[in-house]
Structures are given as structure tokens and as C-alpha cells.
Amino acid sequence: EETEVEESSKVDDSEEELDLTKEEPVKEEEKDETLENISLDSSNESTVKDVKADYGNKRVLIVDDNYSNVKVAKRALRGFNVEIDECYDGQDCLDKINKGEKYDLILMDIMMPNLSGTKTLEKLKENPSFNTPVIALTADALAGSREKYLSQGFNDYLAKPVSKEEMKKTLDKILKKA
């Protein structure tokens, strides 16, 4: 039986266009990152909708400084029965955790201004009661990247753009244990 979750917290299943008119202009370096990270391959559309799972309303925090990348991550989580929260930099993530917000999983972008994903994770781990799994979410897909992020303390690694199948495999490993 599905529990009621605040409407704004649920993933939007509609196929609306991204409305970025309310966001600040995208910096030149972000344009390349966004274009590189968003898959526009519509041939995956049928398989994307077929991947479903029920993670029992687990709470997932997406931390990424790029609005479009957050939207892509939310779409990759669609159909998995998770409650999603989002923030746009490492300090916001720290503030949420320090104010007592509890999550079952954090998806953390690595390349963020001011406080990188790696530095944010280091600060989170300074708190002895922090035990939430954190997954590196990055465009760094070179050989050895997974090992690099695991050695830095991340629980797992996902390369952008994240496919629904890869997201499910990772969620199965992390959330099915909990």
C-alpha cells in the first residue's frame, strides 16, 4: 500500500519540458557539462519506462550544482518509489544533515563550486553519527574512476548520464541491504 508523501517530494511522472527560465543563466563551462551529461537518445525511451522497483519510500538526496543534472537524476529514479530531496551545493547538503534531515542515500556530484563533493563527504564523515551511504555522481568515467571514488570514502560510483538500469543496480546494492 502506497503511503502518502507530500506532493512536491514525489518524482513528477509527466513528460513536461524543462523550464529553466527561472534559473540563473548557465555559465559557459556548465553548458559543456550539461550537454555532455544529458542523454537525448530517445531510442532508450521504452526501456527507461520498463525499469521499475519498489524501495519502500526510502529518502534520497540529490546534490548537484546543475539544475538539469538534478532533473536527469530525478528521472532516473522515476518508478522506484523513493522520496527525493535536492540541493544545489555541498554546503546546502551539510546544512540539511546538520539540521537533522535523515536520508537513506545521497547522490553527490563531485565537481561543484565552493565545496566539491569529495570535500562535502569529508565534512559529513567528521560527524560520528553520520552513516548515510553516499554515491559519487560524476562525468568522470575514465578507467579507474570507480576505485578512485571508493578510496575517497564513497560507497559507490555512478557515471553521468545515469541510466535507469545503472541506477537500479546501485539502489539494489545500497538500499536492499538497509
Image (tube, rainbow, N blue to C red):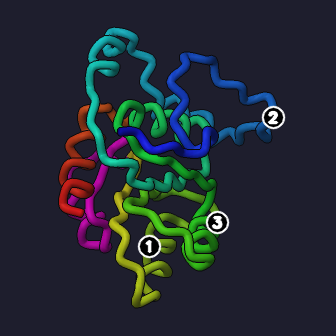
Pinpoint residue 22: horizontal percent, then vertical percent. Answer: 81, 34
In this image, 168 relative to 84: left or right? left
In this image, 139 relative to 177: left or right? right
Q: Which residues are magenta?
A: 140-160
Q: Residue at x 58, y 79 (%)?
A: 98
In this image, 107 relative to 12: left or right? left
Q: Which mark is residue 15?
A: none
Q: Which mark is residue 121?
A: 1
Secondary structure beneath dot 2 equals: loop
If you read the primary sequence from the N terminus, does the residue marked by circle 2 or circle 1 appear first? Answer: 2
Q: CA distance from mark 2 to mark 3?
A: 20 Å
- Quadrant in which the C terminus is drawn: bottom left
Badge 3: how crowded within 10 Å, few (<14), some, or many (20+)?
some
Q: CA distance from mark 1 to mark 3?
A: 12 Å
Secondary structure beneath dot 3 equals: helix
Pinpoint residue 157: horizontal percent, then vertical percent. Answer: 29, 54
Taking 61 as reference, is 38 above or below it?
above
Q: Which mark is residue 22?
A: 2
In reply to whether residue 142 is colored magenta, the answer given is: yes
- Quadrant in which the N terminus is drawn: top left
